[in-house]
Amino acid sequence: MPSNKKHSWKHKHLLDVDSLASTEYKSIFSLAEKYNKLLNNKKMIKKTLSNVNIFNLFYEPSTRTRASFELAGKLLGANVINIASNISATQKGESLINTIKTINAMHSDIIILRHEDSGAAYLASQNTDKSVINAGDGSHAHPTQALTDSYTLLRKFKSLKNIKITMVGDIKHSRVARSNILLLTKLGAKITLCGPKVLIPKSFSTDNKSRSKEFSFKNINIEHDLDKAIKNADVIMALRMQTERQHSKNIPSLKEYAKKYQITNRHLHSINKNCLLMHPGPVNEGVEISKEVAESSLSQIEEQVSNGVAVRMAILELIYLNN
């Protein structure tokens, strides 16, 4: 793992990974490594966020991300307040901006926001003088998951330069995929996107005119055949089918999708024996991956969850202490 004694951070918010300098994500990884070691001896963790008020504002259901942020904050001594949209003023018609202003008036220090609309975190950051952390906005971005995934891989490979990573699934609607592609290519990884044509966004088209300008395409390839896509991969990252965001019938059924793109025990015999399997969760066993694969020795799924706590501790500390 990279080690920086002096941690670099200049941002008030964490809205996506594209604005992070290499020194900043290295600072996150370095500090996360420190906390990962201390999590086995929690009494040694300094309460650097004592009396800091953190508001978890989640407009979409979440288990892993919300609990991970809550635990990260509490381990650092913060007061963590959870607000779920189904019990909040949003049910009475309050807008996101008004909710943010209300939380702002409650002596908040950090607002962690998950929202179904892309760009919601940016809107929130423009209407508060507090720090905003994007915990997922629509199909746009999920920076803390991407940072967790890169950190998990760096603990295995030390460097991601030329590491071959195949992402399989609903790339089009996945905020995790977009943030991961941005960060992993920055770190030198080579990305292959695999899935049905209707689930690969046009921004990744081989037609350069329609390609998004935010990605480095020299390290991104598209392969619709699963066996070919994973054959030489160092890492396979399965992505959840985002059925709640698929407003049109992109695929006939999940059963049909699983026939072509589910990673099963059969694939374990044809891939690189040291290949790692990842999934940001929640895992739909029998759709994206089989139960056997999820529980295999190649699986890093539990590592991702565990590492997510340390990464979010690092992010919370860097944002608060540098603002």
Image (cartoon, grey):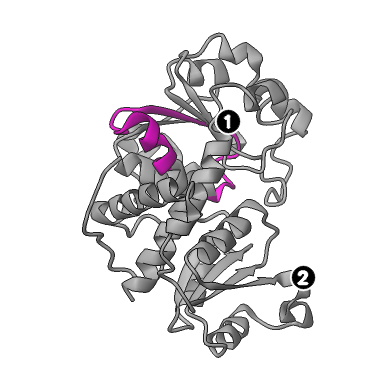
As helix, strand or loop, the secondary structure at mark 1 comes to: loop
Q: Is 238 located above or below residue 46 in the figure? A: above
Q: Nearer the viewer, residue 285 or 53?
A: 53
> Callout 1, which amino acid?
Gly
Residue at 62%, 57% in the rendered image: 67
Place residue 11 in its image quadrant.
Answer: bottom left
Of residue 58 and residue 35, the one placed in the foreground of this image is 35
The label number, if any, that marks residue 27 in the structure image: none
Indicate whether 110 appears above or below 285: below
- At x 46%, y 27%, the residue is 235
CA–CA distance in space, label 1 to label 2? 34 Å
Earlier in the chain: of badge 1 and badge 2, it is: 2
Q: Nearer the viewer, residue 33 or 240?
A: 33
- Residue 246 located left or right of residue 55: right
Rate crowding at label 1 as few (under 14), some (14 to 19) or many (20 or more) other CA atoms within 10 Å. Answer: many
Specify start and end residues of the magenta stretch as a single range: 150-175
Residue behind mark 1: 195
Q: Position of residue 43 (x, y in %)?
A: 48, 58
Density class for disc 2 (Cα within 10 Å; few <14, some 14-19, many ≥20) is few
Amino acid identity at mark 2: Asn
Q: Looking at the image, which residue is at 52% across and 82% down? A: 108
- The residue nearer to you, when weighing 115 against 11, is 11
**Tag of residue 86:** 2
Percent position of residue 19, x then y? 33, 60
Extreme-bottom residue of the structure:
105
Q: Secondary structure at mark 2?
A: helix
Residue 73 lies, with reference to residue 265, above or below; the image says: below
